[in-house]
């Protein structure tokens, strides 16, 4: 993958905002450990002290957009990038009510703004050429919200 594409994918990734997903991992406990916690029944069945039981624990992680964009571009090219942006939009819409039901930290919910509407329209194919439309969008975004050079404090 050449440097221009890598730079473009990083730029797109930074425009997508913060998103989260739930992952799960198995946790194994013996029946005796469950009985110490006060559980005599597991899924309606009597807990056997010597038996092993598998429970799933869930945790929330932040999605690394650049890594996923790179993988999508490698597999399908520009179409993969479009598909990822559309998937992310749907994912965020599906996850908001789940996170709200879980009473997720309000600060995390505020950070999860979703996909920018302009970028979403480009990904939906409203623009004729994805890459040229994306570059136009990025330049207009930079023009509107351009970075301000910070003044240094002190004499150095």
Image: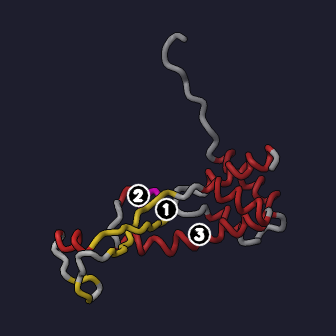
- Helix, strand or loop: magenta stretch: helix
Residue 83's spot in the image, x, y percent?
70, 70
Residue 78's spot in the image, x, y percent?
79, 63
- Crowd band around label 1 with a 10 angstrom C-alpha radius: few (<14), some (14–19), many (20+): some
Of pointers 1 and 2, the one earlier in the residue sequence: 1
Q: Kindly report which numbered mark, 1 or 2, lies closer to the viewer in this rendering.
A: 1
Residue 71's spot in the image, x, y percent?
70, 59
- Identify the image quadrant of residue 38: bottom left
Q: Are marks 1 and 2 in contact (CB under 8 Å)?
A: yes
Left or right position of 75 against 50? right
Q: In what element is the residue under mark 3? A: helix
The C terminus lies in quadrant: top right
Q: CA distance from mark 2 to mark 3?
A: 17 Å
| Range drawn in magenta | 108-112
x 68%, y 49%: residue: 11
Q: CA distance from mark 1 to mark 2?
A: 9 Å
Q: Which residue is mark 1?
A: 20
Of pointers 2 and 3, the one earlier in the residue sequence: 3
Q: Which residue is mark 2?
A: 108
Instruction: Please give the label number shown on residue 89.
Output: 3
Q: CA distance from mark 1 to mark 3?
A: 12 Å
Instruction: Please give the label number shown on residue 152.
Output: none
Q: Are marks 2 and 3 in contact (CB under 8 Å)?
A: no
- Crowd band around label 2 with a 10 angstrom C-alpha radius: few (<14), some (14–19), many (20+): few
x 65%, y 59%: residue: 68
């Amino acid at each position: 993958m050449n440097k221009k594409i890598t730079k473009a994918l990083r730029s797109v990734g930074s425009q997508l905002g913060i998103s989260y997903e739930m992952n799960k991992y198995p946790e194994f406990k013996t029946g005796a450990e469950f009985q110490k916690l006060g559980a005599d029944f597991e899924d309606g069945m009597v807990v056997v002290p010597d038996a092993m039981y598998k429970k799933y624990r869930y945790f929330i992680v932040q999605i690394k957009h650049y890594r996923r964009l790179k993988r999508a571009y490698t597999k399908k090219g520009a179409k993969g990038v479009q598909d990822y942006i559309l998937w992310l939009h749907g994912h965020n819409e599906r996850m908001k009510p789940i996170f709200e039901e879980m009473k997720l930290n309000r600060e995390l919910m505020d950070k999860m703004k979703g996909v920018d509407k302009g970028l979403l329209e480009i990904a939906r194919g409203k623009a004729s050429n994805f890459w040229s439309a994306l570059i136009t969008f990025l330049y207009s975004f930079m023009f509107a919200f351009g970075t301000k050079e910070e003044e240094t404090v002190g004499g150095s």
